[in-house]
Amino acid sequence: MEPLDVPPSPQAFIEQVGWRFAATMPHIPHEYTVRGESTAGVPPPPVSWHDWFVDQVEEHGYRAKWGRFWNTYLELDGWKYWVIDPVINRERVEEECAHRSRR
């Protein structure tokens, strides 16, 4: 069986994808990328890379509540990632802390 095509690290996936600012939610600044779609003019990475990163968030992240929703978050290099399939979202950790203090 051939090994699945996956990135060498989470950072490799992060660098490969395009990230789009969530303009419909400027009061909650974050970015996102969508499985299998070009984002911000950047062609999508292989779907297997996206799926692998989703698995990394689920396996190595932590559960936390946001509003009335529970999500799994993974923090890497000053960013926090979470998945609302087929979308991977991210925000800077310091942005999240600023939002929490305003609630």
Image (cartoon, rainbow, N blue to C red):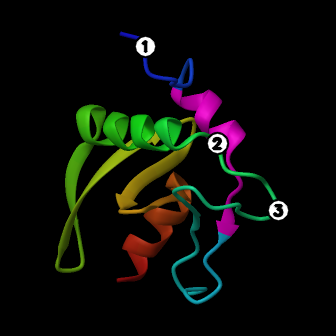
| Separation (CA) of disc 1 from disc 3 | 29 Å
Which mark lies nearer to you, 1 or 3?
A: 1
| Separation (CA) of disc 3 from disc 2 | 12 Å
Magenta stretch: dominant secondary structure: helix
- At mark 1, the secondary structure is loop
Badge 3 amino acid: Gly
Dot 3 and dot 2 residues touching (CB under 8 Å): no
Please name the residue shown 28% across and 32% down the image: 60
Badge 2 amino acid: Pro
Please name the residue shown 58% across and 89% down the image: 24
The answer to whether 84 appears left or right of 50 in the picture is left
Q: Circle 1 sits on which residue?
A: 3
Q: Quadrant where the N terminus lies? A: top left
Residue 45 marker: 2
Give the mark nearer the N terminus: 2 vs 1: 1
Badge 1 amino acid: Pro
Q: Circle 3 sits on which residue?
A: 41
Please name the residue shown 37% across and 71% down the image: 100
Q: Quadrant where the C terminus lies? A: bottom left
Give the mark nearer the N terminus: 1 vs 3: 1
Please determine whether, in this image, residue 36 is positioned above or below residue 84. above
Task: Tell which residue pokes out farthest to the top in this image.
Answer: 1
Q: How crowded is mark 3: few (under 14 residues within 10 Å), some or many (20 or more)?
A: few
The answer to whether 37 appears left or right of 73 in the picture is right
Dot 1 and dot 3 residues touching (CB under 8 Å): no
The location of residue 46, given as percent across then percent down, is 59, 39
Which mark lies nearer to you, 2 or 1?
A: 1
Dot 2 and dot 1 residues touching (CB under 8 Å): no
Camera-nearest residue between 83 and 47 = 47
Residue span colored magenta: 10-20
